[in-house]
Each structure stands twice: as C-alpha cells, then as structure tokens.
Amino acid sequence: MKLIECPRDAMQGLAHFVPTDLKIRYLNALLQVGFDTLDFGSFVSPKAIPQMRDTADVLAGLDLSTTKTKLLAIVANRRGAEEAVMHSQIQYVGFPLSVSETFQQRNTNKSIAQAFADVTDIQSLCVQEGKEVVVYLSMSFGNPYGDAYSPDLVGEFTEKIVQMGIRIIAPSDTVGSSTPEAIESLFQYLISKFPQVEFGAHLHARPGDGPAKVRAALRAGVQRIDGALRGFGGCPMASDDLTGNLPTEEIIQTITNEGITLPIDQEALQKALTLSAGVF
C-alpha cells in the first residue's frame, strides 16, 4: 500500500502565504514519517497559485539524505514540466486532466483536447529525462456542471492515457461528490480493465466520511491513496467549505484496522501533526 501525502494540495488555497522556511520545516518533518511519495509543490503560474511561487526554493531546502520518500510536483503545461524535470530530486511529475470540459477550462484555462496534447508533450519530456508522469483524472465521480459523465467515459480517458505509456493514474473525487459504492464500482471496473496501471485514489470528503471511502477503495483493490494531514485543502469549487482532502491520520487508522501494515513512524507523524498547526 502506497500513501501519498499532499501538503501542496493542502496549502495551495490558503489565503495567507506560508513562509518558505516554515514550508521547508514542515516538509522535512513529513519526509521522516514514511510516506511513499510527497506531493510537495507545483511549477505553475505564480499568478494562478501564488502559494507555490517558492517551490524551487523549498526544494533546495529539503533534506532527502535520510528518507525513502519520493517527490512529486504538479504542473499545468509543458513549460512547468520543463522546469520540474530540471531538478534531480523530483521523481514524479503530476498533471491534472479532467473528464469535465468545464472544469478543465476553469482549472487550467484549456480544453480537454489541449490538455491531452499537453499530456503527450509532458510524457515525452519525462521519458527523455527519466521522470514518471502521474495523471490525476479530475471529476472522475461526476461533476456539478451538467457535463457528460459515466464510468465508461473515465475508462475512455484511461485508455488514451495508457496508450501514451503512462502507468500511474489517479481518479479524483474533486468536489467530494462520490459515495463508497461509486468508488468501489469505478475502481473495480478500471483495475479489471487495465491491470497494468497503478491506480491511485485522490478523494475528497466531508468530516467523518473519509473512512468509508477508504474502505471502499481497499475493497476494490486500490493500493495507492492520497491524503493530507488533518484533511486540510480540497477544491475551492466544492459545494461547501467542509469538503477537504482525506485526513491522512484517518487513512492510516482505517488501513491499519483492515490488517494492512504500513511503514509509518508514529513519533514522526505526531511531530508533523503538531507542526501542521503552525502552517495552517
């Protein structure tokens, strides 16, 4: 089971700017917990996401000497990917591709067709530079805009992504609209149809709803789950302010209750939880 901690997702929507040195201290604490991957920052327009304007400086301050945790950075176009692949510390480059045309336009100012072209370019660049692309399929459980949606549509997007040679895909519950039944059904369908793909669950939920969603993903065979300590962050387009990332501590407890052992350092986790209060 791979746990992906997403401080970037948690921080990017904050109204106040988190000082660079505090970001570095927080991320260094997270690097000691035992997560598989840290979604630590993004190379995007500072006008669009001002919170992440210091990602390169944050990266330079990270201590990777005593951790096995890998680094993932989000990009929104080829230019961002070109900046990300320059850094040897980064193993994964993430891109948000939406199955909703409306959300793709709102999120990256591009059409789905243009976004697919970006994914093609980014994959080519990452293969050349020895990085791996992670595609986040936004709105994989429906959308609030009335755009077409079905599990088959998610499957069609997945097929196109797989044909590019990409092997990590994370269907995302962008606005917290999914139910445990929908999560289990979609992942069972995708995992059976594309057994060569590592599917991740990037889910959002209201307080208290996370454990049921995690259990549903586990029943479907998901072995990669995203979270953020204390459930901070989430999509600003969700229907209410209570919808956030799955709290990592709840994910860990739920997975442990299912009898799955995780390589988590509990003392380091508690230190990171304490430090998160100062960040958020």
Image (tube, rainbow, N blue to C red):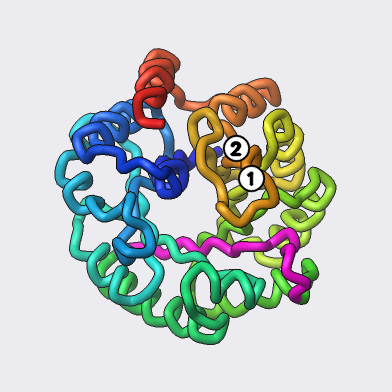
CB atoms of marks 2 and 1 within 8 Å = yes
Residue at point 66%, 62% (across, down): 139
The quadrant of the rendering that contains the C terminus is top left
Q: For residue 227, which numbered disc appears in the image?
A: none
Q: Is residue 120 above or below residue 235?
A: below
Tell me if I can see residue 198 in this picture. yes
Quadrant of residue 159 within the rendered picture: bottom right
Q: Which residues, given as a range, are shown in magenta? A: 131-147
Mark 1: which secondary structure? strand
Q: Who comes first in sequence, dot 2 or dot 1?
A: 1
Asked whether residue 32 is drawn in magenta, I would say no
Q: Which residue is mark 1?
A: 204
Q: Is residue 265 visible?
A: no
Q: Residue at x 42, y 16 (%)?
A: 270
Figure quadrant of the N terminus: top right
* Residue 67 in picture, x, y percent from top left: 28, 33
Residue 191: horizontal and vertical position, in percent?
69, 58
